[in-house]
Image (cartoon, rainbow, N blue to C red):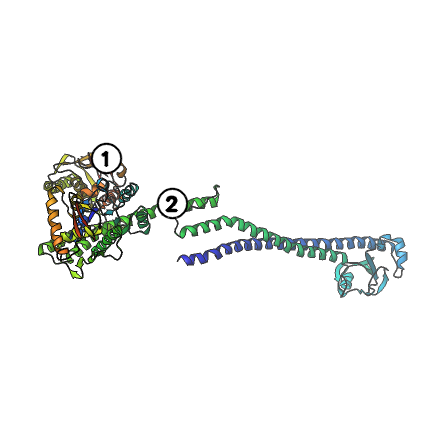
């Protein structure tokens, strides 16, 4: 699983960089293209309008002059120019056609002699309308033409055509197009490069985190990401990562300690069974010797079975597979019942188990589990008492909680161990020496039962003087 | 050969002690770390020929005991016995001065073999066989021969001979013999030692010109080639 992740991780990082840059580039490209296209169209339109307007202006002046002066059909252009200097504008040329469309006068600056009057223009002139046209010739810039009818008393006398080359306009548009086509991609390329660099920079901390996470995944949970001090997204990601690793490290340690403890606890009975059996088999023994070995083995088997049962129960609680009932349980009845049971147990060792106070108290929960919990606490108290000792049980209902205390005057628990006695398999040396048959799991189970009942267990203990365990559970209904 | 066993699991300590005693070793058992250290320390130099040490002990952890012993130049071989099998635990133990390491559960025969190896190392013998002239003792099989002829010994006779042979040429006082071969106080026991030395002489030296066991008047006994 790991190797697959590793092989996938690197290309994915690069792909993100490429994707970011690509999206950025596409967006920028589209914007640039729209901008360039619009610019080109607006400019082309504007330039053409300008040309048309100048043609119109020239035509208006010429037509007015020609109409007022009633120029005859046969005039020389030079005479005409003398009278109307406006007509001699260099960048425009004139043609005057007869109403049938034959050329009567041509300005000398016309480049092509053969620009005939188009049918459309003639038709429009006959109808009394002016018309714009663009004449195109191969290998030459197009020419913009304006044909205007000249009328005298309602009849068409001439058709004036003013033309101008679109060379300059075309040239400008070409320049513009060229500029746009060169600068656009160039700008895009520069922007893409910048985008690539920025994406790289933005993703670099992610790469660093990936690298560090891979090192950590390789097994060394003591490593941490060197978090940038900043509180930006990446900094927060690194912090979150570090917190997660710290939690992982914690639970890893716990698991390691737990499995070391578990293997120790299971190996001890195995060692005894293996050693005693091998020793017995080394040479012939008496039937009594064999019986002793078998009895001892049976004891060890029972011990292992208890450990395994407790372990299985705890692992089922870890998986959330243990079902708990929630019914009213009379704690006072339970305490009295367990006291009778424990008193019998204590008699064998000369230990007195008694109840000091008991007040009625009802809690919601699973009676069997609660019985297991209380019995465990009382059994512990008996187990760690000295011969002739006394174990006291008390139950008090107080505000909204029931307080059940089990007090012994036995060996006690060292202060530094008190926080750990609920850990699985944790046992103090004294406890080991005093009660070698314990599994080290009882209190872990008690703690779990208390917690699923929304309660807790408190410990007060003094080494050599005894311990008091207090079970605090929320009451189902007010005491009384 | 006297062995100190520091082990807190009563049943484990019990079967190891019985196994060692069946092999004619004298065994002292201690279930507490602090007491174990005190025993190993207070005993006269060379009292214990081997210490078998559990690591998880009430009072004082085995590793601490080991460190103190080595610091105080107590050089008896130490065999660590523990349920922890991780490599770093073994390395720690060996680095602290242990001579060998055995993890639980273990085979009794392996424990006994390792005990023999550690005791052999102390006496400088090579192939696992003790030899003085034509007298040969094999600790692994417990066979004793002289001039190729097998000699049948009782358990105590064997232990006494092994102790004498591991200390060839060295005069062994009666208290030393009592401590290494028997589990009892020497005061009540001097006669027994003399009686057993006589048994041993009858079996080993009788009929041979070259006597191996010699009495050092007023002190004790010595086994040596003449």
The residue wearing badge 2 is: A246
In this view, A212 is above or below A470? below
Number of residue marks? 2
Q: Residue A4: horizontal and vertical position, in percent?
A: 42, 59
Residue A73 occupies quadrant: bottom right
In this view, A16 is above or below A114? above
The answer to whether residue A321 is visible is no
At label 2, counting other C-alpha atoms closer than 10 Å, the crowd grade (few under 14, some 14-19, many 20 or more) is: some
Q: Camera-side residue: A211 or A134? A: A211
Q: Camera-side residue: A168 or A232? A: A232
Q: How far apart are marks 2 and 1 (CA)?
A: 31 Å
- Earlier sequence position, callout 2 versus callout 1: 2
Residue at the extreme left of the image, as rendered: A287
Q: Camera-side residue: A302 or B32? A: B32
Q: Residue B19: horizontal and vertical position, in percent?
A: 17, 53
Give the chain letter at badge 2. A
Q: Residue B167: horizontal and vertical position, in percent?
A: 22, 49
Question: Could you tell whether A119 is left or right of A187 in the image?
Answer: right
Question: Could you tell whether A158 is left or right of A384 in the image?
Answer: right
Are discs 2 and 1 located on one and the same chain?
Answer: yes
Residue B136 occupies quadrant: bottom left
The answer to whether residue B29 is visible is yes
Which dot marks residue A460?
A: 1
Give the chain letter at badge 1. A
Residue depicted at 26% across the width and 36% down the height: A415
Secondary-structure class at tag 2: helix
At label 1, counting other C-alpha atoms closer than 10 Å, the crowd grade (few under 14, some 14-19, many 20 or more) is: some
Residue depicted at 76% across the width and 53% down the height: A53
């Amino acid at each position: 699983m790991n190797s697959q992740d590793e092989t996938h991780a690197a290309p994915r990082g690069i792909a993100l960089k490429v994707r970011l840059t690509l999206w950025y580039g596409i967006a920028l490209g589209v914007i640039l293209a729209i901008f360039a296209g619009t610019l080109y169209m607006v400019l082309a339109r504007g330039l053409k309008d300008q040309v048309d307007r100048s043609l119109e202006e020239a035509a208006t002046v010429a037509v007015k002059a020609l109409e007022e002066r009633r120029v005859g059909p046969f005039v020389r252009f030079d005479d005409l120019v003398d009278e109307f200097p406006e007509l001699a504008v260099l960048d425009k040329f004139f043609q005057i056609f007869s109403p049938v469309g034959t050329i009567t006068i041509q300005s000398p600056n016309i480049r092509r002699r053969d620009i005939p009057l188009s049918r459309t223009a003639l038709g429009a002139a006959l109808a009394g309308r002016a018309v714009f046209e663009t004449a195109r010739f191969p290998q030459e810039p197009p020419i913009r033409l304006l044909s205007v009818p000249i009328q005298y008393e309602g009849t068409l006398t001439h058709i004036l055509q003013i033309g101008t080359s679109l060379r300059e306009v075309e040239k400008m548009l070409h320049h513009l197009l060229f500029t746009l086509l060169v600068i656009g991609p160039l700008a895009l390329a520069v922007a893409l490069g910048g985008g690539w660099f920025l994406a790289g920079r933005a993703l670099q901390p992610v790469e660093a985190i990936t690298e560090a996470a891979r090192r950590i995944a390789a097994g060394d949970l003591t490593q941490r990401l060197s978090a940038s001090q900043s509180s930006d997204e990446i900094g927060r990601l690194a912090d979150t990562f570090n917190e997660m690793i710290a939690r992982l490290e914690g639970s890893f340690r716990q698991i390691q300690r737990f499995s070391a403890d578990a293997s120790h606890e299971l190996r001890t009975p195995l060692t005894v069974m293996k050693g005693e059996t091998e020793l017995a088999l080394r040479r012939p023994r008496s039937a009594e010797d064999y019986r002793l070995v078998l009895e001892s083995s049976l004891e060890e088997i029972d011990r292992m079975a208890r450990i395994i049962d407790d372990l299985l129960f705890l692992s089922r609680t870890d998986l959330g597979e243990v079902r708990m009932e929630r019914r009213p349980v009379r704690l006072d009845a339970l305490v009295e019942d367990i006291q009778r049971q424990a008193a019998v147990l204590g008699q064998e060792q000369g230990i007195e188990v008694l109840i000091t106070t008991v007040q009625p108290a009802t809690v919601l929960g699973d009676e069997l589990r609660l019985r297991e919990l209380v019995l465990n606490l009382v059994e512990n108290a008996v187990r760690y008492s000295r011969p002739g000792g006394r174990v006291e049980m008390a139950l008090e209902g107080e505000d909204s909680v029931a307080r059940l205390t089990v007090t012994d005057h036995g060996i006690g628990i060292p202060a530094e161990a008190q926080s750990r006695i609920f850990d699985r398999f944790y046992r103090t040396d004294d406890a080991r020496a005093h009660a070698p048959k314990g599994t080290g799991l009882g209190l872990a189970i008690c703690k779990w039962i208390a917690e699923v009942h929304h309660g807790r267990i408190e410990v007060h203990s003094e080494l050599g003087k005894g311990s008091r365990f207090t079970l605090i559970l929320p009451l189902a209904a007010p005491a009384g | 050969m006297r062995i100190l066993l520091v082990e807190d699991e009563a049943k484990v300590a019990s079967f190891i002690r019985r196994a060692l005693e069946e092999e004619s070793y004298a065994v002292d058992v201690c279930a507490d770390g602090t007491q174990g250290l005190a025993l190993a320390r207070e005993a006269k130099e060379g009292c214990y020929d081997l210490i078998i040490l559990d690591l998880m002990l009430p009072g004082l952890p085995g590793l601490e005991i080991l460190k103190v012993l080595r610091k105080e130049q107590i050089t008896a071989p130490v065999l660590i016995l523990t349920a922890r099998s991780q490599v770093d635990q073994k390395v720690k133990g060996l680095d602290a001065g242990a001579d060998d390491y055995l993890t639980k559960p273990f085979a009794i025969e392996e424990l006994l073999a390792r005990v023999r190896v550690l005791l052999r190392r102390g006496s400088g013998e090579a192939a696992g066989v003790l030899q003085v002239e034509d007298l040969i003792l094999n600790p692994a099989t417990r066979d004793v021969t002289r001039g190729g002829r097998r000699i049948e010994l009782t358990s105590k006779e064997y232990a006494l001979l092994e102790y004498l042979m591991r200390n060839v040429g060295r005069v062994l006082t009666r208290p030393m013999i009592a401590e290494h071969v028997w589990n009892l106080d020497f005061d009540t026991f001097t006669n027994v030692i003399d009686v057993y030395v006589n048994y041993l002489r009858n079996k080993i030296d009788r009929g041979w010109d070259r006597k191996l066991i010699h009495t050092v008047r007023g002190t004790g006994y010595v086994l040596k080639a003449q």
